Amino acid sequence: MLCDNCKEREAIINLTHVEHDSKVTLHLCEQCAQQKGVETGSAVMKTPLGGFLTALGKGGALLPTPADGLRCSACGSTLRDFRDTGRLGCDQCYVSFDMHLRDLLRRLHGSSQHVGERYDLPGSEDTDPRSRLLELKAQLRRAVEGENFELAADLRDRIRVLE
């Protein structure tokens, strides 16, 4: 199939654009896709995540190779595609590759569950309610001084629970 844009080169990228209730698919060659701002295979490898995953894979298997052929039921992407590019094909890839992604996240971050803006080791929370209460009161004071009243109200409620 020829490129819908230049009609000269072979189309290798299918760009689907959904607007309201209509779906338009463009078949583009690599050059026309780059002109439209679509990242092609060579551009994806230049991204930090793609390079990081590639480098990590050289030190040892990043994802188990027997599962490389596992495909997403929605878009057809494979785990090998993810390992090569550092990108998943669609939102269903998270469901299709759930077990393998959890394992990868555990190895990279120490956990496969997001727990907030900063990393806390399990069991490292302050168990003394008095020191926790003092910390919350200090945060409340700073929030009021900074006129962040939504945060101040939340902190006030948390203090009431502890008191």
Image: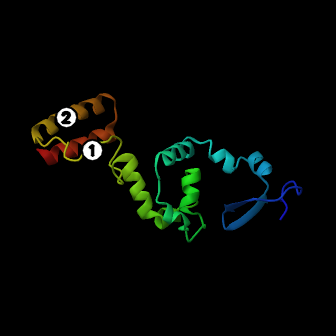
User: Where residue 148 sits in the image (x, y, percent)?
Assistant: 34, 35
The answer to whether residue 102 is left or right of residue 72 is left
User: Where residue 55 sits in the image (x, y, percent)?
Assistant: 52, 43
Mark on residue 154? 1
Mark on residue 162? none
Which amino acid, mark 1?
Asp
Of 123 and 115, nearer the camera is 123
Which amino acid, mark 2?
Glu
Q: Residue at x 70, y 67 (%)?
A: 22
Q: Residues within 10 Å of mark 1 (few under 14, many from 20)?
A: few
Q: Is residue 119 visible?
A: yes
Q: Pick out the residue farthest to the right.
A: 8
Residue position marked by numbered label 2 in the rendering: 135
Q: Quadrant of residue 144?
A: top left
Q: Residue at x 36, y 52 (%)?
A: 106
Q: How is the image coloured?
A: rainbow
Q: Is residue 39 visible?
A: no
Q: Residue at x 68, y 61 (%)?
A: 19
Q: Quadrant of the N terminus?
A: bottom right
Q: Pick out the residue farthest to the bottom.
A: 73
Q: Secondary structure at mark 2?
A: helix
Q: Residue at x 67, y 62 (%)?
A: 18
Of 18 and 154, nearer the camera is 18
The answer to whether residue 16 is left or right of residue 99 is right
User: Where residue 64 sits in the image (x, y, percent)?
Assistant: 46, 60
Q: Secondary structure at mark 1?
A: helix
Of 104 and 38, nearer the camera is 104
N-term-proximal mark, 2 vs 1? 2
Q: Residues within 10 Å of mark 2 (few under 14, many from 20)?
A: few
Q: Pick out the residue farthest to the top.
A: 145
Q: Quadrant of the C terminus?
A: top left
